[in-house]
Image (cartoon, helix red, strand yellow):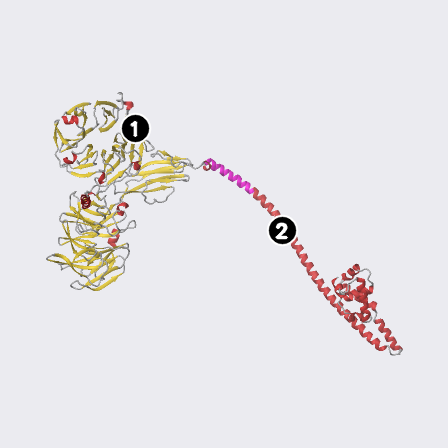
């Protein structure tokens, strides 16, 4: 059992079951915000999709989903659009939805026009529109509504599963147990009562080979001719007849879609061959297909038992997605000998080309594959382990020199190939046993992923981080004889030969190799074609020499250059891709794009590959539509919808507004970007964004025009949607209030003028007072300065008089001293004349006169002293005062004695007596005391 188990796992790893499918998008309940089951699908004239869901009517505009509920909140089983109206049927109700001025759908019941009551618990499963007639089908009846006459015609049509069909302008239906009928002249006419049609439910009625073709519930097809059935024998019969069929549709191209209960859908061509089988395992959201619809862009919409899926049948892309991870990231691919080979990070895989066969793993190629090159009818596989040659499902290791990047022919040496490796260059040689490693090239050991031969036979090697090397080898390609190294020229490593030019690309542009100067020079033509301000190439350049196309990727485009139809000038073709596509390509710089045919290419991705069919590229016209305009309220969950077609007139407080818009485009690999401008707020268009909503809050009063446009892929929308509105000024800015404000301003100006005038008068008076006060202060200050000057003058005069007093006192002292000396000399002479002289001397030593003179001079110098000391010591005599005056002049006893005409001893006695009168202690100095008064 264990051996069987591991054998099964091994075979599963070897055999990868998948198929190339159109792009598929799945929408789950959390995407569209309603219940799981979706019973019917239709498209309105503006391109919106409508779905009958258990919750109600779903609307999808390409960006946002919206749910409309029926009046009785029942499941909507049928949906059909006609013009601007969406007809629906549900439990005990049918009618139509129309668009109101707000852009929302509102329901109008048709039951009020019906005179016959409905059958109890009647539910309407199908709607068909033919000319002015609307057919509502339940399990009991068909109600035919004439939109012109607004009348009904009722046909009994009991069945277990309501189905109604239109082929060639004739309406068919099935009655259980009776067979197939058609509606003719307002009644039912039998078409076939074949026993099979009585017991088996008819799922679809189509037209193939100009004959009606029936699809039955058991998966069988029958042509209907003159009421007889003949089986349609097709290759798909064995698979379909084992399934239970629930839905079917014939597409615009005549092919058929068969929806099953448990195995997704089968897409059949007009010969009955299976083009695609898509189920949950290959990308569908669910295996039970309840409804099928083809929109105007040939997208296939599927209403599922759990969710909604859309298949882009007409897309120029198809996907091969390895959901199990057994394949890995595709680094290289090629078609050789009728097989498609894929080189991945997990090894080498192959399958028959142009078939829906399975990929098989090629034994012994486990690990990283870097390249697949076909040279001289031999397929070389560059591998992490070395180099393999591949034939069918067999790979032979011919070189174990690790890390083979790729091989190239050597001119004039058909027996040799140059190989780039992790560790430099090597040479492969062909002999009778095939190709094998001959030698490694000596003298160069730098990784050589990108290398090319110049016309002169030199080898160019580009290394992203080390630069560009020009190598000259010896004639036998054994070693390098000369190396010219140039530093890297920008970020990125790419080297490719295109139209005999060797091109190098970095983030700085495209550079062309000039043989004369042996340098790369920026090529303005290639750079201008591949680079623009909006986008730049990323990754590497890839050349398709068979179709003369030069390919590269940007974040938003796949683009290629090719010669024009009428001249050799390079023309650029851009194929838009979403950013997610670019991120899924795998590592940057290892992009893989190879031709499968003239106009079909394979692009390697991180979990498989995508094919690109250039024949399906077409120009489309896109129109943007404004879906809603709403005023925002204080509650972020509540908004007030507004009429879209009318100009908005809003109050001042209604200044937060929200717009939604969309392009009804449903391709998986096309993104719509939006750009808006609010005239009155913005002077320019805002930046492009994926968001389909614009919100403006707290707008000022004024006139505004909201404009929005879209860019789907690389195409601008044909129109610009717009909405004009005005936000009124607040009441306090109304015309009446402005007039009131003007009057108030005038009054205020007058009052301010009056107040200002009074104020300035008071200020002037205050300033005058202050000036007067200042002048008075200055005058007083001047007077004080004058008094100070006078006082200083008086002090100078006093000092002068004191000086004069001192001089006079000294003169008196000298005079008296001199006279006393003469007198003493003359006293011993007894001569009358001498006595007369002595008397004359005594008269000149008149102490009273001297004192009077001294007192006058002393009072002039120190007028207050004698008054103060008299007041302080009234008991002092005139002699005591004379002594005090002399002491005030700081005279010594010796100097005072002549002035008093007494001896020095007598002066000391007088001083002693004066101390006692004054009451000085022994320690206090008499002179100090006198000077301190």
Q: Which residue is mark 2?
A: 771
Q: Residue at x 88, y 77 (%)?
A: 833
In the rendered image, residue 276, in percent from the top left (x then y), is placed at 18, 39
Q: Is residue 740 magenta?
A: yes
**In this view, 77 is above or below 892:** above
Furthest toward the front, the residue is 1
Q: Earlier in the sequence, mark 2 or mark 1?
A: 1
Q: Which quadrant, please, contains the N terminus?
A: top left
Which of these two is toward me, 293 or 19? Answer: 19
Q: Are marks 2 and 1 in contact (CB under 8 Å)?
A: no
In terms of secondary structure, where does tag 1 sit? loop
Q: Which residue is mark 1?
A: 74
Residue 700 visible here: yes
Which of these two is toward me, 840 or 765? Answer: 840
Which of these two is toward me, 434 or 648? Answer: 434
Mark sitting on residue 490: none
Q: Which quadrant, please, contains the C terminus?
A: bottom right
Instruction: Find the magenta span and give its range.
Output: 735-753
Q: How many marks?
A: 2
Report how far apart the C-alphas of labels 2 and 1 lie in the structure: 97 Å
Side of 578 where 928 appears, left or right? right
**In this view, 407 is above or below 597:** below
Side of 424 where 847 appears, left or right? right
């Amino acid at each position: 059992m264990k051996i069987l188990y591991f054998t099964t796992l091994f075979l599963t790893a070897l055999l990868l079951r998948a198929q190339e499918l159109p792009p598929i998008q799945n929408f789950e309940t959390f995407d569209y915000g309603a219940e799981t089951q979706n019973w019917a699908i239709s498209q309105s004239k503006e391109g919106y999709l409508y779905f009958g869901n258990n919750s109600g009517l779903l609307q999808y505009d390409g960006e946002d989903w919206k749910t409309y509920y029926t009046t009785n909140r029942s499941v909507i089983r049928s949906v059909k659009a006609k013009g601007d109206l969406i007809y629906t049927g549900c439990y005990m109700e049918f009618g139509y939805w129309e668009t109101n001025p707000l852009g929302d759908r509102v329901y109008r019941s048709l039951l009020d026009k019906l005179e016959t009551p409905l059958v109890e618990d009647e539910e309407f499963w199908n709607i068909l529109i033919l000319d002015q007639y609307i057919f509502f089908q339940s399990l009991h009846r068909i109600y035919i509504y004439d939109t012109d006459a607004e009348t009904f015609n009722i046909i009994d049509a009991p069945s277990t599963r309501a189905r109604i069909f239109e082929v060639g302008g004739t309406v068919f239906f099935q009655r259980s147990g009776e067979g197939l009928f058609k509606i003719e002249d307002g009644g039912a006419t039998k078409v076939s009562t074949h026993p099979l049609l009585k017991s088996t439910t008819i799922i679809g009625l189509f037209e193939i080979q100009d004959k009606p073709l029936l699809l039955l519930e058991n998966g069988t097809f029958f042509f209907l001719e003159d009421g007889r059935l003949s089986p349609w024998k097709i290759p798909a019969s064995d698979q379909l007849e084992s399934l239970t069929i629930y839905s079917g549709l014939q597409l615009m191209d005549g092919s058929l879609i068969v929806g099953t209960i448990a195995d997704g859908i089968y897409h059949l061509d007009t010969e009955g061959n299976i083009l695609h089988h898509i189920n949950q395992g290959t990308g569908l959201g669910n295996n039970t297909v309840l409804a099928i619809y083809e929109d105007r862009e040939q997208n296939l919409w599927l209403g599922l038992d759990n969710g909604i899926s859309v298949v882009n049948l007409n897309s120029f892309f198809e996907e091969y997605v390895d959901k199990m991870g057994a394949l890995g990231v595709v680094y290289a691919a090629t078609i050789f000998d009728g097989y498609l080979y894929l080189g991945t990070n997990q090894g080498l895989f192959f399958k028959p080309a142009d078939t829906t066969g399975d990929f098989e793993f090629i034994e012994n190629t486990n690990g990283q594959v870097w390249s697949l090159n076909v040279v001289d009818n031999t397929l070389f596989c560059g591998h992490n382990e070395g180099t393999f040659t591949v034939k069918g499902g067999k790979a032979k290791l011919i070189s174990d020199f690790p890390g083979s990047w790729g091989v190239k022919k050597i001119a004039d040496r058909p027996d040799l190939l140059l190989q780039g490796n992790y560790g430099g260059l090597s040479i492969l040689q062909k002999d009778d046993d095939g190709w094998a490693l001959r030698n490694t090239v000596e003298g160069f050991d730098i990784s050589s992923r990108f290398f090319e031969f110049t016309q002169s036979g030199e080898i160019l090697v580009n290394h992203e981080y080390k630069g560009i090397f020009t190598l000259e080898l010896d004639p036998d390609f054994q070693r390098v004889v000369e190396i010219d190294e140039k530093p890297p020229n920008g970020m990125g490593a790419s080297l490719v030969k295109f139209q005999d030019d060797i091109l190098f690309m970095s983030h700085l542009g495209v550079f062309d190799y000039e043989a004369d100067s042996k340098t790369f020079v920026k090529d303005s033509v290639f750079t201008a074609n591949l680079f623009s301000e909006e986008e730049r190439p990323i990754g590497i350049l890839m050349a398709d020499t068979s179709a003369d196309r030069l390919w590269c990727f940007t974040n938003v485009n796949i683009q290629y250059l090719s010669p024009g139809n009428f001249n050799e000038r390079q023309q650029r073709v851009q194929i838009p891709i979403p950013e997610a596509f670019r991120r899924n390509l795998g590592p940057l710089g290892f992009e893989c794009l190879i031709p499968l045919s003239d106009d079909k290419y394979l692009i390697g991705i991180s979990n498989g590959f995508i094919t690109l069919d250039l024949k399906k590229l077409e120009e489309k016209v896109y129109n943007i539509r404004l879906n809603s305009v709403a005023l925002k309220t204080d509650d972020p969950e509540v908004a007030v919808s507004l009429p879209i077609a009318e100009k908005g007139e809003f109050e001042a407080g209604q200044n937060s507004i929200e717009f939604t818009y969309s392009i009804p485009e449903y391709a998986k690999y096309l993104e719509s970007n939006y750009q808006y401008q609010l005239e009155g707020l913005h002077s320019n268009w805002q930046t492009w964004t994926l968001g389909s909503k614009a919100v403006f809050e707290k707008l000022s009063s004024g006139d505004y025009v909201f404009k929005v446009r879209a860019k789907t892929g690389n195409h601008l929308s044909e129109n610009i949607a717009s909405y004009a509105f005005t936000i009124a000024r607040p009441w306090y800015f109304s015309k009446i209030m402005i007039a009131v404000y003007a009057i108030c301003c005038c009054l205020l100006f007058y009052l301010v003028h009056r107040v200002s005038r009074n104020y300035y008068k008071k200020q002037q008076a205050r300033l005058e007072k202050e000036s007067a006060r200042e002048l008075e202060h200055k005058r007083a200050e001047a007077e004080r300065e004058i008094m100070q000057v006078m006082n200083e003058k008086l002090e100078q005069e006093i000092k002068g008089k004191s000086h004069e007093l001192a001089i006079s006192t000294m003169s008196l002292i000298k005079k008296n001293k001199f006279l006393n000396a003469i007198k003493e000399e003359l006293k011993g002479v007894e001569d009358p004349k001498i006595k007369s002289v002595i008397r004359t001397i005594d008269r000149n030593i008149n102490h009273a006169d001297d004192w009077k003179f001294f007192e006058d001079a002393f009072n002039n110098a120190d007028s207050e002293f004698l008054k103060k000391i008299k007041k302080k010591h009234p008991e002092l005599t005139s002699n005591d005062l004379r002594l005090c005056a002399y002491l005030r002049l700081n005279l010594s006893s010796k100097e005072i004695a002549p002035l008093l005409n007494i001896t020095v001893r007598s002066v000391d006695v007088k001083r002693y007596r004066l101390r006692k009168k004054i009451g000085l202690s022994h320690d206090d100095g008499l002179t100090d005391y006198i000077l301190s008064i």
